[in-house]
Image (spheres, rainbow, N blue to C red):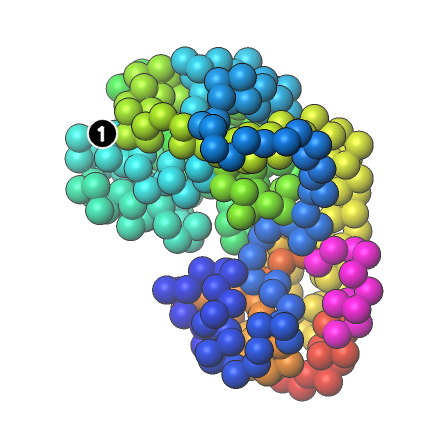
Amino acid sequence: MKDNKHHGGDLGWAINHFGLSEEEWIDLSTGINQSSYPFDLKENFNVNALPSKALYDACLSASGSYFNARLTPSNTLLTPGSQFIISQLPHLFAPDEIAILYPTYGEHVPAWKEAGHKVHLVRNIDEALALNSKFILLVNPNNPDGKLYSQSELLKISNQQASRGGYLVIDEAFIDISSEESLSDYAGQEGLIILRSFGKFFGLAGIRLGTLLAPQDIIERLQRRLGPWAVSSITLAVATQAYQDQEWIDRQKTNLSKSSEKIDRLFSAVGCDIVGGTILYRLYHTESASTLFNHLGQKGIYLRHFEYNPNWLRVGVPDIHNELLWQRLENALSDFHS
């Protein structure tokens, strides 16, 4: 069984475990869009020069338009990936108590513990509020089950936290496909901290771009930790182009919806019940999860298996146009017997 110490995308683990070469693998273990944005940078970048303020400002402006938010340097900080924010954010505050809605993305809990905070794992918002902790953290939509909280519900909680000097921290890594529920337009509001990720929806995780939306004092504290020139010129240019390509964005949402429906049909046919997910990843329940995980692994198809719930499998949604991938997946599932 793939244990919870490994992330999705850890293909090295799968290679070592199943013994296949890298070229033989189909990696469906992540929620990263498999149809990457086809950027075309016509500028001749001078890699001998530091990233310019003009490039940063252009990316910030494009981000604001894409998020449908009023972003400024006082309420927004671009970083080298949202994982940087996850690891550094807890260190901006004196140790306190935090309620984290669980299960969820695995890096949040250790980050807050490492910074000395007392972490309470809770199953729902009511449990979180009952603890009266300074921080409440959730992922929206949640990873791995796709649970989506409404904007109105989260604004109410944020205001409650602010009234008592606390914060609601929202990881919106997968909000692109449910952008109407994003709280990005409330960037800078007291009691509200938002993390955004560029690489998931645009399929460019290697570009490493994250965005922190928060009150000015938090932005300034993280900026000091980050230092100058932290986001590369290439990253800023690629993201600026991608955020402005509305035609590609709309087409991707349509294609991903079709792909998610198709993969649901395939896994339902082998006895998997749909728990939830998004159009970038699907979560299934089956008592044969471990057997199916290993069956597909032996055929070079890598899924995500969870130690804390061994009956769950998370499956990344393939590119609708990758016919060879779909055929391999269909063939592998067709000869599975639980």
Pick the residue in front: 169 or 21.
Answer: 21
Q: Residue at x 80, y 39 (%)?
A: 251
Disc 1 marks which residue? 93
**Quadrant assignment, res 221:** top left
Looking at the image, residue 49 sits to the left or right of residue 131; the answer is right
At label 1, the amino acid type is: Phe
Q: Is residue 170 above or below residue 73?
A: below
Residue at the spot 51% in from the left edge and 45% down from the top edge: 142
What SS does tag 1 mark? loop
- Horizontal side of 119 relative to 141 (left or right) equals left
Q: Position of residue 316 (x, y in %)?
A: 62, 58
Can you say which quadrant of the picture contains the N terminus? bottom left
Rendered view: 218 above or below 271: above
Query: Measured from the top left, where is residue 199 in percent x and y?
Result: 57, 43
- State which region is magenta: 318-328
Q: Nearer the viewer, residue 256 or 311?
A: 256
User: Eyeballing the image, is 38 above or below 64?
Assistant: below
- Viewer-closest of 297 and 140: 297
Q: Is residue 270 visible?
A: yes
Residue 279 colored in magenta in the image: no
